Image: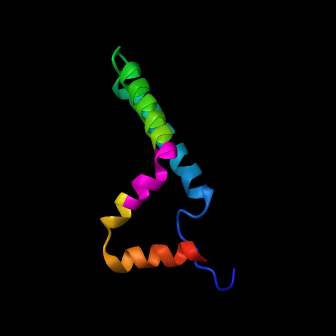
Amino acid sequence: MQGQELTPLSHSSPLFFGGLGVARYLGHLSYRVFKDSIVFPFALSAVGFAIIWLGVLWQRREAQWSTRLRACLPAPLRELIEARAAR
């Protein structure tokens, strides 16, 4: 890949393995730490629904939120992002 920079999040493998790590840790929590808890599965379900809801909101309002978040970035970083988007 000559002439292209690779960023850590530009590929899906880090996301895949990160997801496996999160699933493993949640399995550890559910089977060992909170094995006698009745509330943990409901709390975990609530967190899952919140993540899905935020994903739907992000999809609907991505342009607005991206503009607001980019306005908070320092100027050099914002220019770098805009230059990479123009390619």
Inspect the magenta stretch and tell me whether residue 61 lies in it: yes
Residue 71 image-quadrant placement: bottom left
Query: Magenta-highlighted stretch: main secondary structure?
Result: helix
**Residue 80 drawn above or below residue 31:** below
- x and y percent of residue 53 in the render? 45, 34
* Residue at the image point whose x is 47% and y is 55% from the top: 63
Quarter holding the N terminus is bottom right
Tell me which residue sits at (47%, 73%) in the image: 81
Residue projecting furthest to the bottom = 3
Which residue is nearer to you in this view: 15 or 33? 15
Residue 87: image x %, image y %? 61, 77
Q: Is residue 30 above or below residue 71?
A: above
Tell me if residue 82 comes above or below residue 20 in the rendering. below
Classify residue 38 by image quadrant. top left
Image coords of residue 44 (percent x, y): 40, 27
Could you tell me if residue 44 is visible in this image? yes
- Whether residue 61 sits left or right of residue 12 in the image: it is left
Position of residue 78 measured from the top left corner of the image (x, y, whole percent) = 39, 74
Compared across the picture, whether 5 is left or right of 37 comes to right
Which residue is at the far front? Answer: 64
Please count the marks in the image: 0
Is 27 contained in the magenta span?
no
User: What span is colored magenta in the figure?
Assistant: 58-67
